[in-house]
Structures are given as C-alpha cells and as structure tokens.
Amino acid sequence: MTSVGKSIPHESAVGHVTGRARYIDDLPRMSGELYVDFVGAPVTAGTIKAIDLAAARAVPGVVCILSHHDLKGPLFLVEREISYLGQPVLVIGAESAAAALAARQLVKIECEERVPILTIDDAIGAETFIGPQRHMCSDAAKSDAEFEAAFEDSPHVLSGQFHSGGQEQFYFETQSSIAIPGEAGEIKVISSTQNPTETQFVVAQALGLGRHQVVCECHRMGGGFGGKETQAALVAVMASLVAQHTGRPTRLVLRRADDMLITGKRHEYQTDYRIAFNEQGRLLAAEFDFYSNGGAFSDLSTSVLERTMFHADNAYHVPKFRVSGRVCRTNLPPNTAFRGFGGPQGMAVIEHCLQRIARVVDRDAFDVRRVNLYRDGDPQQSVTHYGQVVRDHVLEEIYDQLGETSDYRRRMARIIEHNRTSTTEIKGMAISSVKFGISFTTKFLNQANALVNVYTDGTVQVSTGGTEMGQGLYTKIQQVVADEFGIAPRRVRVMPTSTDKNNNTSPTAASASMDLNGAAAIEACRQIKERMAAFAARQFAVSDLKLTSSPDRIRFADGHIFDERNPSHQLEFGPFCHAARHERVDLGARGFFATPGIDFDRETGRGSPFYYFTTGAAVAEVTIDRFTGVMRVDRADLLMDIGRMINPGIDRGQIIGGFIQGVGWVTNEELRYHDTGRLLTIGPTTYKIPNITDFPREFHVSFIDNPKHHINIRRSKAVAEPPLMLGLSVWLAAYHALGFLRGTDPIDLSIPATGEALLNAISSIGRSRIGRRSISGILRDNAPATNT
C-alpha cells in the first residue's frame, strides 16, 4: 500500500466544491465580536496637518478609533509622513460593518500634498532607492578591459531597454484576519497568511508583547501567490490592535477594492541591456542593469531583486556576464512577492534578447536557444554567473523531445505560409525555457520542523510550518507520512498550521515548502518508527523463538508491521500502537530538516544558493487579429522535469495553473494608474485575469524522466513557481508574429502584450511587408529566417 506517486484527491477537494471548506469570513461570529475597518491616507504623498474625528466618533456603534499613539511597537500607522495613497492612518472598531464604514467616511484628514514619485524613471532622476545597488559577475567578466573587448570584438551587439509590468495576485480570499484576546493579555490570531511566524512576530512587536504571548494560526487560504507572505501581517495587526484595546474578539476582511489599492504586487521592471553574440547566435557576453519599482518601503523588494539577478541567465550560459540591480523607491504601496519572486522579470529579458538575436543572425529562435543551453557535465558551459554549477539536468533532452512532440518545424512552415497569404490575421510561434533555482536565497530560511503524533488507534496527526493555500501541500505531506507508516492516507490528518506547534518557521514560498516541511515530517516519522521497530522486534522474538531481536528487519506496509524474514506473521498497525503505548513507547516526535549544500556570499556575489533546479520548456502558438489586436492562444505544449511526482494530479494542476497565471501576466493583466498614483484597475471589471477563453485551444502537458536526479524527497522536484515562467512563450509568440510585419526592424513590445498594445504595434508598423518577400528566402531549414 503506497500512495506516493498516485493522484489521490486534494485533502479539501470535497470541501472546496461543496462550500464546506471554511475560510476566515466563513467562521461563525463570536460573542461580542467587533468589525474592524481602517482609514487610509487621502493623498499619495504629503504630510498630515490635522485629523477631525468628531463626526466619526459620534456614529452609533463605533467602539474605538485608534491611531499610531495606540501602538506600543514600531509604527505601521501613519504618524505624519504619507508614503502612498491608502496607507493606513486609523483603525476603527465597531459593532457592525455599516457603523465602521460610516465612521470611516466621516473622518476628515487635512494634508499638505507633495508631488509623488510614481515611476522608475522618476525615482532614478530623484535618486530615491531602497537598499544598495547589487552586482553579480562571472569570473570571465571581472576584468573591465576583457569584458569591453568581448563587445568590441563581437560580430554582433544588441542593446536596448525592456519593460515588464506589475501583476496583482488576485487571490480569491482577500487579506483577512481574526484576533482573539486571552485572559492574560495574550492574542490568538487566525490569519490568511503564508507566513504565520512573521505574522506572530509583527503582531507581537506592534502590540508590545513577547512572541510567546501571540499565537498565529492558519487553517487554509483562498489563494496567496506571494501576496500573503508578508502583507497579511498588516491586516492581522489592525485586527489585533482593536482586540487588545477593547478586550473583545475582532475580524477584518478587506473589500476587494481596498485590498487592491493598498497591497503590493509583482514588481514592475525596467532593464537596460546589451548583449554580444556570434553568427550562430551563440552568446559571448551580456550586461543587464535591472531597476525595479519597490514602492514606498522595502518589504521583500531586495530579495526579489536578488532572485531576478540569479535568474538573469534563465537556462542559457553566458560566458561573460555582468548583472546589476537597483530597487527604486516610489509613492506606491510596497511591492512584494509574487509567484516566481523576481525570476520571471529576469528571464523575460534574456528570452527577449534571444528572440532578437535570432532575427539578426537569420536563424530559427529554437536553434538559437538550443545552442546556448547549459550543458550538463561540460565545464565550459555549466557554470552560472554567480559560480554555481548547473548539474544533473536534461535541458537539451527537453528541447529535443519537445521539438518532436510539438511538431515544431512543420507547424512553423505552416505559420509562414499562413502569414504570407492572410490579410486579416498573423500567427506566431515561440519556445521558451525555465531553469528555476529551488531554495530560499536567504540561507537561514532553508529549514523546517514538524510534529508527528501517532495515536493508539493507528491514526496520525501531522503539524508543520507549511500553510495550505490550495496548492496541495497538506495532501502531499499526508501521502509521504502515510507511506512511512505503511497506512492509508485517510488515516493521516495534517493539522492547521500554528506557531504554538511549529516555531520559528519559514514562509510557504520559494516553491520549497514540500521539500522542507515534508522532509521534516519524514524525519519525525522515522524517529517514531525506530522506537516502534525496537518494540516490534521484541514482540516477534517472543512469539517466534526462531527470530532474534532485529529492529532493522521490521517493515511497515499495508496497514501492518512484520519482520521481513517472516512476512506471514503480521501485527495490525492500530492494535500494535495501542500495545506500544501500554509498554510506554513514545509515539510522538519532532523532526527537523535543514537544506544541505547551499551557501552564497553576498559580498562577493559567489556561491551555490540553490539545492537543485526545476527545468522545462514550452512551445506556444498564437493568432492575432490585425484589425482589433485581439490574440488567442491556439496551442501550448509544455514539457517539464519535475522529478518523480508525489502526486501527479496535483502537480499537473500546479503546472497548468502556473502557466495560465504567467500567460495572464504577459497578456491581459495590466495595472493602470492615474497621474495622482491612484490605482484604476481595482476589480475584475477593470483588471482582467485569465478567463476560460484565454486557455489554449489545444493544450499538452508532459513530463520527462531525469535519471540523474537523486536528491530531495522521493526524488521529487518543486513545481509551484517554475511553470509560470513558461507563460513567456505566449508573449514571445506574439513578438514573433509581429516580426512578419516589421521585417528585420526592432519591435517595440513590452509586457503585458494587451490587445491594445498589440493593435498599437500593428498600427505603428503600417502596411504589411509580407507580399514583397520571397517565401523561398524564408523557408530555410524548414524554419523562418528573417522573421524568427
């Protein structure tokens, strides 16, 4: 009886589809519970001169209106200086939601307004930055003279500036929190958070409590995507502040518009680049200068930028590579984590460059990418610009297999012919890669602990620091724990995440949560099994005098325990646990895991920050209406190496969901701001997340075996974030399509390529050049030449 490798249903699947799965807003209201709301800054930048609360306090049902004066720790409410529109100034506690909202609308804040800094260019001009400028450099690029010579001596050099926009996480459950005061001043927080430990820490700081006085619990989230890694703490503090002040339980569930207005998003990037290459399109040298829009405060911006710099190479080896990065401080809400954590913004630049390179050297972009891939075992083409060896991968095999299964060459020829004859549509096709490093790039976060309790009926409870946001973490942990004890997964329950059971834990992020928490749970199981095996060996020795006591021969399988030398003599797991307890065998354990073999020196920019890499590639084909700019995704073929899957159904779902979320970023998801800094796209009517009509008409998801991968739990690989980056293939396919109109001239197309942006690009190109070009000149090697 093994469950690892099987597509067992998500542990909350029935609850999800029936509505029985409870989120924070679904939990029954408690006696005396207060509604919490907040008042945000009315301007984008400026100074508070005066606040009038008279009318607000007079609203029937208003219990308290709290300000920075009521905080005991570091301020998170505006004291005087306003850094972004909607920045919380006051927190309201009331008997009803209507009373809280009425009071909010009656608060009068007088401000002295300043001209805000909103864009990356504004910040660069004003020299307003967060943190120092960061640098990474390959060994071969350390000499200025040799680095510049690589460009001067190169047959080809391209330079330019690339823009990628932000993205709203758009979790279905908005930021939400319940705070329950205790009898001795302690606070219990039930939070929709990816990071219970940080929420515990921030609440304790703000309220002047020790961390031992705060418990943060997370039952489940209605989505997170990075948006609840740090910023869930803001809502938790507001609810907890009112709870501490009034001694009553409180709840705050943000309205969608408020959530989108005040929370951070994927970072917008602007990148200056130059890249040198030879006649075959092989990369010789590159220099990328990244600038991100961090918003008003640091949040996770410096860490996001670091991962961008780590992934500037994506899956391609650049012999001489210099990368720098700077976080720009602006008057927008602090931007934060989003699935991929800066990786997509870095990969987008090199993928864009490779697409341009293919046009210059008159080769298919598939072949240009293929020749630049990291090569496993090749010392000349396997070391990153930060010094880590990329090993045990199958990047070249992925390309070769995907080229065949996607029928790339024949379809490309058909696309060329279609574009030669069609006057209403243009088609494009492109391949993109992903090589995503798995581990937190901050070393101390690569640790986890787990508590496993076995009960006398043979059932098991598991507690870890990992949170469940729909991604299936609980289900996978359930599977590996069940297999450790040789029992059915239904006999294992993963408990709600809570800081009083698992202390000092890392956020559920970086795609590493199963790696860390699953390994810690397995370690706890093995401690218990070691004690169980010793007891079982004594039992078998008594009942079978031919067997000597031998714990290493004890096996757990199919709900039973037995000695492998006499498998017919079995003890049922439940009664065995009952007997073990009566003999005072400890049936509980705490496991701990720390990721081995990772280290990175930020001072030198060198080291091995990642345990391994998850890799893959995607081919996407699109059609664009030349008169409206509307684009459809005709087909997508994904091929990934994610090791040996613990739950193929969940992993497949993560790949599909991640890819579509990436497609949303590069196509329809556009954040629009007013000149004052007010976000205009504050809901699904104006901010367009992918719809069913954006799904590829034909969609293939496949997996490749990698016999070289032997590390990690059951030889699995992380899967949550990497497929998002493959959404770049759709943007590249749109870029490729426009090339049939532009010829060899550069194409101006940023991320996202909305219908409006595509129509503007088509209009700027003007009359199609297809009719003036020779098809024989294009069809070279069964692939496009000047229009790759």
Image (cartoon, helix red, strand yellow):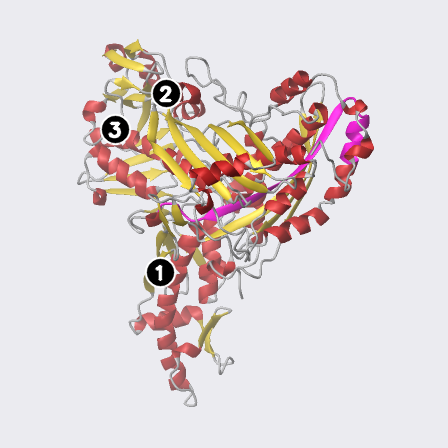
The mark found on residue 564 in the picture is: none
The kind of residue on which mark 3 rests is Val
Residue range corresponding to the magenta coloring? 414-442
Identify residue for label 3: 242
Depth order, front residue of 429/124: 124
The kind of residue on which mark 2 rests is Asn
Query: Where residue 399 sits: x, y (%)?
Result: 65, 48
Identify residue for label 2: 331
Q: In which quadrant of the rendered view does residue 780 lie?
A: top right
Depth order, front residue of 31/12: 12
* Residue located 81% across and 29% down the image: 774
Looking at the rendering, in which quadrant would you find the C terminus? Answer: top right
Q: Is residue 708 magenta?
A: no
Q: Is residue 427 magenta?
A: yes
Query: Where residue 159 sits: x, y (%)?
Result: 55, 29
Residue 368 lies left or right of residue 665; in this view the side is right
Q: Answer whether residue 462 is visible to the viewer in this image.
A: yes
Q: Earlier in the sequence, mark 3 or mark 1?
A: 3
Q: Answer whether residue 119 is visible to the viewer in this image.
A: no
